[in-house]
Each structure stands twice: as C-alpha cells, then as structure tokens.
Image (cartoon, grey):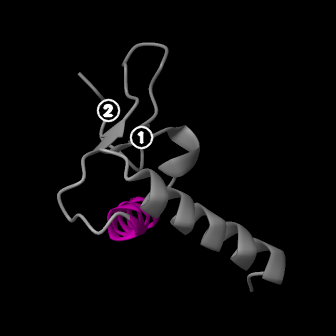
C-alpha cells in the first residue's frame, strides 16, 4: 500500500521530469534490484517525458563498481 505522502512525492517527480525534459536517465544500484522493477521504472521514466526512445543508462563500471550483480544480472566480463 502506498501512502498519500508517497503519492504526492511521485507526482512531484513526474512533474519535475516533464518540466525539465531530460535527454535521458542514469540508473544506479538502488534502481535495478529486480529485472521486472527495472523494466517498470524504465517504462515510467520514458512515459514521464513522453519519449519511448529516451536513453536509460546504468552506471556499470565493472571491477569494484558493479551495479548489475549476479544472480539477477549476468556477470560482467
């Protein structure tokens, strides 16, 4: 269940992205915990800016900085 305060926060976020019209988005580890959740987030972000082609990048540097970790994501080479 989502609280009224969380709904207000989400609405502010949507308005912010619509007003700012970012070229794309960068996701971090806290944004990519599950495949389905990540897919939903990407869809929601692109919907906020009304651009299905808005780039969504993940800060995945490899080595010590690895946002996409097994078992959910395949191991980076």
Q: Secondary structure at mark 1?
A: loop
Compared to 45, does 20 lie above or below?
above
Q: Where does residue 36 sit, x and y in percent of width and height?
A: 40, 67
The mark that comes first in sequence, 2 or 1, is 1
Q: Is residue 36 above or below residue 27?
A: below
Q: Residues within 10 Å of mark 1 (few under 14, many from 20)?
A: few
Point out the residue furthest to the front here.
19
Identity of the residue drawn at 74% across and 82% down: 2
Q: Residue at x 64, y 66 (%)?
A: 12
User: Crowdedness of circle 2 by 10 Å Cα count: few (<14), some, many (20+)?
Assistant: few
Q: Quadrant of residue 18?
A: bottom left
Left or right side of 14 for 48: left
The kind of secondary structure the magenta stretch mainly shows is helix
Magenta stretch: give its range: 34-48
Quadrant (top left/top right/bottom left/bottom right) for the N terminus: bottom right
- Residue 50 image offset from top left, x and y in percent: 29, 69
User: Badge 2 is on which residue?
Assistant: 75
Lateral position of residue 11 relative to residue 34, left or right: right
Q: Residue at x 49, y 14 (%)?
A: 64
Please name the residue shown 37% across and 19% down the image.
61
Pick out the residue farthest to the top. Answer: 63
Name the residue nearer the viewer: 59 or 68.
59
Q: Which residue is mark 1?
A: 70
Q: Relative to 45, say whether 54 is above or below.
A: above
Asked where in the image residue 3 lies, by quadrant, the reply is: bottom right
Q: Nearer the viewer, residue 49 or 38?
A: 49
Q: Is residue 39 magenta?
A: yes
- Res. 8 image quadrant: bottom right
x and y percentages locating residue 62 in the rendered image: 36, 19
Label total for image = 2
């Amino acid at each position: 269940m989502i609280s009224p305060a969380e709904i207000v926060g989400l609405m502010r976020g949507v308005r912010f992205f619509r007003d700012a019209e970012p070229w794309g988005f960068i996701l971090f580890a806290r944004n990519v915990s599950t495949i389905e959740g990540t897919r939903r987030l990407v869809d929601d972000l692109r919907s906020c800016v009304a651009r299905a082609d808005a780039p969504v990048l993940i800060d995945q540097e490899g080595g010590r900085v690895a946002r996409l970790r097994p078992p959910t994501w395949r191991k980076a080479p």
